[in-house]
Image (tube, helix red, strand yellow):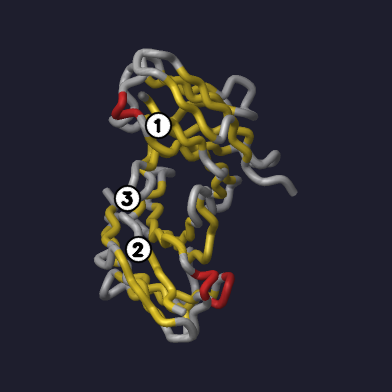
Amino acid sequence: AQSVTQLDSQVPVFEEAPVELRCNYSSSVSVYLFWYVQYPNQGLQLLLKYLSGSTLVKGINGFEAEFNKSQTSFHLRKPSVHISDTAEYFCAVRGSPEKLTFGTGTRLTIIP
Amino acid sequence: DTGVSQDPRHKITKRGQNVTFRCDPISEHNRLYWYRQTLGQGPEFLTYFQNEAQLEKSRLLSDRFSAERPKGSFSTLEIQRTEQGDSAMYLCASSSQEETQYFGPGTRLLVL
């Protein structure tokens, strides 16, 4: 079975400041890890994914995440946030079988 | 390249009525997924198709819920005798052989 923990339900950050959104997972099989972003009243958009290879993954909109197997973490980072980054961010793990298991989400609010 | 589409985007119904939602996946994708997202939560897996075969169903999918994908292309999700607890966003996603699931905009259901 898989599970995902996003400890921070809300993260306020000043514009142009760096941000880290935390994600910890558990899985009994090889993991594939994802970050999705959801804007109000919309579906989920893929930000980035880790399937294998380099543990530092770069995604869209300047986001990156680092897979840490020993700490079972996949934290999302951005060096300088913009107002348009205000959204809900979901970490997800795909183990076996096919389904994605999501965390409860982190609401990122950018303060001008 | 058209993405995943869902219809309708919004549905308001009275308790006890039946509703049906449609999902059109990305055309070359053979895998299709349904998820449910309630307010303040991450999406939860409901069911999964590979081509026309329904391969997995969550325990969340009570006997009032049925999903079909008759020709391996679009899918429908029907809820019979709706209850207020069915109010949620219903998300559809599709994927090919690789691991990334692409989501549609969702259907928001409100049961009065």
> Taking A26 as reference, is B47 left or right?
right
Q: How many marks?
A: 3
The residue wearing badge 1 is B56
Mark 2 vs mark 3, CA separation in Å: 10 Å
Give me the residue at 56% from left, 44% from top.
B105
- Establish whether labels 2 and 1 are both on one chain: no
The residue wearing badge 2 is A106
The residue wearing badge 3 is B40
**Up-down relation of residue A41 to residue B63 (above or below):** below
Give me the residue at 50% from left, 48% from top.
A41
Q: Nearer the viewer, mark 3 or mark 1?
A: 3
What SS does tag 2 mark? Answer: strand
- Front residue (pair B14, A55): B14
Q: Position of residue A22 (x, y in %)?
A: 32, 71
Q: Position of residue A90 (x, y in %)?
A: 40, 59
**Residue type pointed to by label 1:** Glu
**Label 1 near label 2: C-beta < 8 Å?**
no
- Front residue (pair B94, A79): A79
**Up-down relation of residue A60 to residue B32 (above or below):** below
- Establish whether labels 3 and 1 are both on one chain: yes
- Establish whether labels 2 and 3 are both on one chain: no
- Front residue (pair A13, B73): A13
**Label 3 near label 2: C-beta < 8 Å?**
no
Give me the residue at 37% from left, 25% from top.
B111
Instruction: Name which quarter of the figure residue B31 lies in.
Output: top right
Task: Specify the quadrant that holds the C terminus of chain B.
Answer: top left
Q: Position of residue A28 (x, y in %)?
A: 27, 55
- Mark 1 belongs to chain: B
